[in-house]
Amino acid sequence: MTDAQPLTQVKEGVFSSFILHPSSLIFMDIIHSVAALRERLQRVPNNVFVPTMGNLHDGHIQLINVAKPRAACTVVSIFVNRLQFGPREDFDRYPRTLEADCAKLKAAGVDVVFAPDEREIYPEPQTYVVEPSDLQHILDGAARPGHFRGVATVVLKLFNMVSPHSAIFGKKDYQQYIVLRDMVRQFALPIEIIPAETVRAPDGLALSSRNNYLAPEDRREAPRLHQVLARAHDEIMGGARDYQRIELHGMSELADRGWKPDYVTVRRQADLQPPQAGDREIVVLAAARLGATRLIDNIEVFIR
Ligand code: PAF
């Protein structure tokens, strides 16, 4: 067992903590200011970045496991970004669990945690924003106007603060991954965007901080979203090409079980547009409300 020590402030804005490990001492800096972050990263400019909003679960640890072998220094940010939440969304009740998050990050071997407050990221109203392509208006963007603008804007700022050579994003937020991949390409940012596989509970439910909102009976029902996607995957692999029928079937199965589906849709992986004849790299995406909780998930299909 490791033995966690209390955090100690080693210089202004930089907190250092360590755990005793049988073979080594593992240090992790917890940094709150951009100035201290830049100073810390001057020492190890070879860094890989995992941006998060905290409330970490095994899906985030998977992102860190993908990150760690790629650089000398793994940086994780924890920041609940107001800009990407709509006025009636869960910004205020989004779980803030910094202490528990830091314990998990330390155990996962993270080197630097950047946990700024809002004034650090938005010292003045953010009047300059990243306006993603029309991709921001479809699927999740249609249900959450302004969401991808908020995501792209904060991620660009975080990239400028961390200056990583690579950044990891989970495929569970598939549209987010595509928007950010395109942003990096179009602005010629010297950052490689690396997608990481979705982590699932044993019953198939994709891990998400929002799963905590589910009432017990909804939690039992929630794996249906993945089941609907898995069936669509199998149908397409079995030769089905009537994508509209597959979509309607998925939507009606969810609605019959009390969900309020926003979409079940078959798209191309490359640009999330409807597939053309001959497209072989497909993704089936779904978003639906179960009780008060909106869940999203997707499954890639590689047609042979
Ligand atoms: O995926 C998330 O947790 C957030 O959208 C991100 C990328 C950290 C930006 O706030």
Image (cartoon, grey):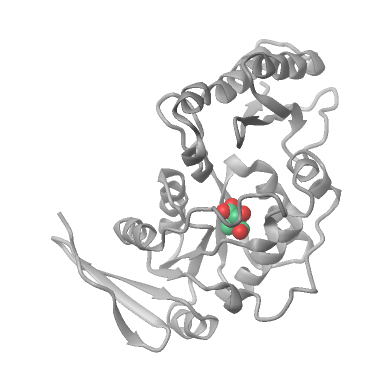
The answer to whether any part of residue 182 appears in the image is no
Image x and y of residue 223, in percent: 51, 24
Image x and y of residue 209, in percent: 50, 45
Q: How many marks?
A: 0
Q: Is residue 232 above or below residue 7?
A: above
Residue at left offset 59%, top offset 42%: 171
| Residue nearest the observer in this picture, 138 or 70 | 138
Residue at left offset 58%, top offset 78%: 120
Image x and y of residue 286, in percent: 67, 30
Q: Is residue 192 above or below residue 271?
A: below
Residue at left offset 69%, top offset 55%: 180
Q: Give the image quadrant in which the ligand numbered 1 is located.
A: bottom right
| Residue nearest the observer in this picture, 256 or 76 | 256
Q: Is residue 27 above or below residue 261?
A: below
Left/right placement of residue 123 relative to residue 34 reads: right
Q: Quadrant of the C terminus?
A: top right
| Residue nearest the observer in this picture, 257 or 199 | 257
- Picture quadrant where residue 272 is located: top right
The answer to whether any part of residue 126 appears in the image is yes
Left/right placement of residue 16 relative to residue 266 reads: left
Q: Residue furthest bottom?
A: 12
Left/right placement of residue 167 relative to residue 254 reads: left
Residue at left offset 77%, top offset 66%: 187
Image x and y of residue 108, in percent: 33, 56
Q: Quadrant of the N terminus?
A: bottom left
